[in-house]
């Protein structure tokens, strides 16, 4: 995928820059790492992704941190005055963004190298949650645009980011969302519920199919909000053991709905799986 190619090119460019800055030839660096010069050349050209242990060795040999090899160059930003009360908070959030970015990049690289589908499935789910949390950093920053779920644009961003991790099946998304003004923590909880529903949908809803339909509805009903997530897949199995109440995804969704939103949820078979979430409209 395009994002993986971008990460590899970023890693290759930074590796080449640091190698030259340290006065090392490809041959010398390859020898220190215990790899062939040909393989190191592929890394520098963005054609190969090193394993995590090799990435750590590469950073150590180039006298830097692994994060520096994968970090996107930051955009210029106006720094607060040294005596600003928000300086420490800004710096902490900046470091958090870097950590999320590094973690996401590492998981994406390992996903490409995963030896079998079971490992790739676990890594995709992890990458999906990281991507969702990274997008939600805007809400934590107090970005007012994240307060409005008008036309589902914010939830659409989450869906598109998560769905890009799953090459198949091809899923057509239908959005029907009315403007609902909510605080950042509500956007977070709705987005995390959406992420869990999507990861389970891609894994279980369309066996033997190469396409499907996903539907999202968001509406205000008096003093409450209703979020509906649905697919046209195989639906819930009539056997309770096939979807145990102790499953991680279901427990996470229930926690987000009940603890973060103060609402209730129900799963139903309606030509597929339908999740309906109702929660009280937070005070403006």
Image (spheres, grey):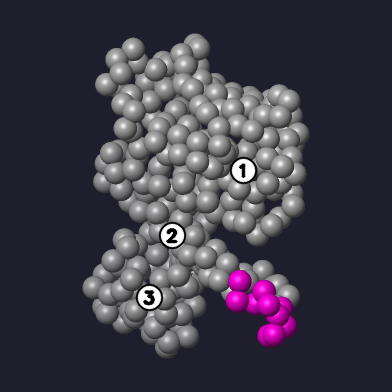
Asked whether, in this view, residue 170 is left or right of residue 107, the answer is right
Can you see residue 51?
yes
Q: Is residue 201 magenta?
A: no
Q: Residue 106, position in %: x, y?
A: 40, 59
- Measured as percent of width and height from the top left, residue 267 is found at 46, 21
Residue in the image at 72% along x and 42% along y: 283
Q: Residues within 10 Å of mark 3 (few under 14, many from 20)?
A: some
- Badge nearest the viewer, 2 or 3: 2
The mark tally for this picture is 3
Q: Which residue is mark 2?
A: 103
Tell me the distance, in whole angstroms, between the alpha carbons under discs 2 and 3: 15 Å
Q: Which residue is mark 3?
A: 59
Residue at 28%, 39% in the rendered image:
118
Residue 186: mark in rendering:
1
Q: Residue at x 30, y 18 (%)?
A: 240
Q: Is residue 82 magenta?
A: yes
Tags 1 and 3 in contact by the CB under 8 Å rule?
no
Span shown in magenta: 80-89
On screen, residue 227 above or below 78? above
Q: Residue 47: which quarter of the image? A: bottom left
């Amino acid at each position: 995928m395009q994002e993986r190619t971008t990460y590899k090119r970023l890693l290759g460019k930074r590796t080449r820059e640091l190698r030259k800055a340290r006065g090392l030839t490809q041959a010398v660096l390859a020898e220190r790492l215990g790899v062939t010069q040909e393989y190191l050349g592929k890394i520098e050209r963005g054609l190969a992704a090193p394993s995590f242990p090799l990435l750590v060795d590469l950073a150590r040999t180039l006298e830097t941190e692994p994060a520096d090899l994968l970090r996107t160059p930051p955009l210029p930003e106006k720094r607060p005055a040294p005596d600003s009360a928000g300086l420490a908070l800004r710096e902490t959030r900046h470091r958090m963004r870097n950590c999320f970015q590094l973690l996401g990049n590492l998981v994406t690289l390992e996903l490409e190298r995963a030896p079998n589908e079971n490992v790739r499935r676990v890594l995709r789910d992890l990458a999906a949650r990281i991507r969702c949390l990274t997008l939600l950093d805007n809400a934590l920053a107090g970005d007012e645009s994240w307060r409005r779920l008008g036309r589902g644009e914010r939830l659409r961003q989450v869906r598109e980011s998560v769905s890009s991790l799953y090459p198949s099946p091809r899923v057509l998304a239908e959005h029907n969302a009315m403007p609902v003004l909510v605080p950042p923590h509500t956007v977070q909880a709705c987005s995390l519920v959406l992420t869990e529903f999507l990861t389970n949908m891609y894994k279980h809803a369309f066996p033997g199919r190469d396409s499907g339909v996903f539907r999202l509805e968001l509406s205000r009903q008096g003093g409450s909000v209703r979020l509906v997530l649905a697919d046209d897949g195989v639906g819930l199995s009539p056997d309770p053991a096939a979807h145990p109440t102790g499953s991680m995804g279901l427990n996470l969704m229930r926690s987000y709905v009940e603890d973060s939103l103060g609402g209730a949820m129900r799963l139903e078979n309606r030509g597929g799986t339908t999740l309906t979430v109702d929660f009280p409209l937070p005070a403006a």
